[in-house]
Image: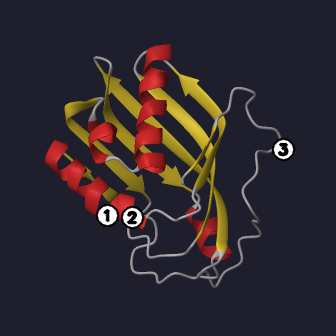
Amino acid sequence: MRELERIWDDHVAAALVRRDVGASMADMTAEPSVRHLPTKAGATGRAAMERFYAEELFPCLPADLAITRISRTVDRFRIADETTVSFTHDRELPWLLPGIAPTHRPAEIVAIAVVSFQRGKINTLRVLWDHATLTAQLGLSSQPTGAGPARPHDGRTDPGAASVAAS
């Protein structure tokens, strides 16, 4: 299971820090898929996923994107990471907020990534975030959610948690 964690952590660093398509795809199956919910952005198949990363995701990552792990659950076939994601909405984010111009406001939300593996390679990646809180923080929601910045319920993060900040 530690090997799965290493593979996933390498993928996150390659994708969100270095924004390196080749390194991001290195530990994926022949037919991987990624889906960002609730927007349903993503791709299925190696060529489509490479295009999604190179054309839709990596160029559209906020400059100050920071991810901090709250918790991680691992079994022999999957990882579930709960993270806090913070950024300034400094550009269009079609994979996160399709059709919304930059608000230049800060946001901090909780996201869940569920990653499944097949024979030691990433097969599927599903990412879900608190869309209502995100839109409220960016001033895009007309209905108040009562939610402020996302925080773990007890104010503590997982002692083994890692923080990834994009450069």
Q: What amino acid is at disc 2?
A: Trp
Q: Name the residue under label 3.
A: 155
Q: Residue at x 41, y 46 (%)?
A: 15
N-terminal-most mark, 1 or 3: 1
Residue topped by disc 1: 56
The quadrant holding residue 155 is: top right
Q: How crowded is mark 2: few (under 14 residues within 10 Å), some or many (20 or more)?
A: many
Q: In this view, does 2 lie above or below 26?
A: above
Task: Kindly state the secondary structure of the residue where label 3 is placed.
Answer: loop
Residue hosting label 2: 95
Identify residue type, mark 3: Gly
Q: In which quarter of the image is residue 152?
A: top right
Where does residue 162 sit, x and y in percent of width and height?
64, 35
Kindly indicate whether the residue at mark 3 contacts the one at mark 1 (C-beta within 8 angstroms): no
Side (left or right) of 20 relative to 69? left
Quick check: 28 left or right of 17? left
Circle 1 — which element?
helix
Cβ–Cβ under 8 Å for marks 1 and 2: yes
Percent position (x, y) of residue 91? 48, 76
